[in-house]
Image (tube, grey):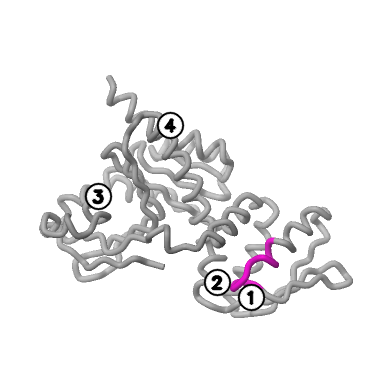
Amino acid sequence: MIKAHALYEVSDWEEISNHSEDSNYLENLIRNRQNIVICSVKDESEIPKAVEEMASRLLENHAVMEDVIHTLRKNFIEKKEDFSLPMEEKTWEEKNMVYELLRDMYGVISCITFSSDGILHGKLVMTPRAQKFINGEYMEIAAYQRVKKIVEALSEKYRKECKIYRNVLVSTRDGILKNEFDMVILFDNMFYIVEVKSGKNFRDFEKYRELGKEYRVVPERFLLLDSCITEERAAMIHYFLEYYASNLNPASLQEKIETMIEKDQREGLE
């Protein structure tokens, strides 16, 4: 899944610029940090189209699937293959949607059946990739597709070059992982970072302010995409911590991405 690059010292960038396009573009993200290197970048082409489509279906139906995903994650943690999902609180349409989504998750879930009492049963495929997908990778994949469309539309509007990287890993020179960014956007030579959170209990919003300041993307060039956040809380985060936050509402996400990037474009024209 990960396209690995060798670990390079910052002083070596000129020597590798003709050999690693990704590393060349990402140079400025870690400039002047003598012990920090870009150690890997995930290539979007390495994810099958069918997996991208499944991830998008899960994200589009997040409201219905949230409790289901929570149960599946719990089973993975407890190493329980068999799972049961009570469905009495869902409508007939929602039950059918859950059944079809789980049925289509080849390589992740198998043996989907409904019992006479209306409980949905199935088996998890206990592999690292299946667990990683359920634990949040599906949201990262689907969010990347959404962000990519928004950024490419802005690129066409302003006639500026853009590039979006997935899962950028930053480490120390001796190979110790320092940071992992879900998405790094390069738009008109300006960097923006997008982080995706899918858990219910995340509260450490301050850490992203400190992380953003370290990489010079706070204020105003960092976006947290949180599946559980409200618009009111997102506004408070932006006011107090000086970075953007959004829930999974497509309109909200588009507004935040456009505001973040277009602010720099307008200032550049002044």
Marks 4 and 3: in contact by CB < 8 Å?
Answer: no
Which residue carries the number 1 mark? 124
Residue 183: assigned label: none
The range drawn in magenta is 101-109
Which residue carries the number 2 mark? 130
Residue 200 in sight here: no
Q: Does residue 182 appear left or right of residue 73 in this picture? A: left
Three-letter code, disc 4: Thr
Where is residue 13 shown, x and y percent of the image?
14, 56
Q: Tell me the CA gap for discs 2 and 4.
A: 35 Å
Where is residue 232 shown, x and y percent of the image?
56, 36
Q: Tell me the CA gap for discs 3 and 4.
A: 23 Å
Marks 2 and 3: in contact by CB < 8 Å?
Answer: no
Q: Tell me the CA gap for discs 1 and 3.
A: 40 Å
Where is residue 9 shown, x and y percent of the image?
15, 62
Picture quadrant of residue 148: top left
Q: Tell me the CA gap for discs 4 and 1.
A: 41 Å
Of the image marks 4 and 1, the number of the one nearer the N terminus: 1
Three-letter code, disc 2: Ala
Q: Secondary structure at mark 2?
A: helix
Q: Tell me the CA gap for discs 3 and 2.
A: 32 Å
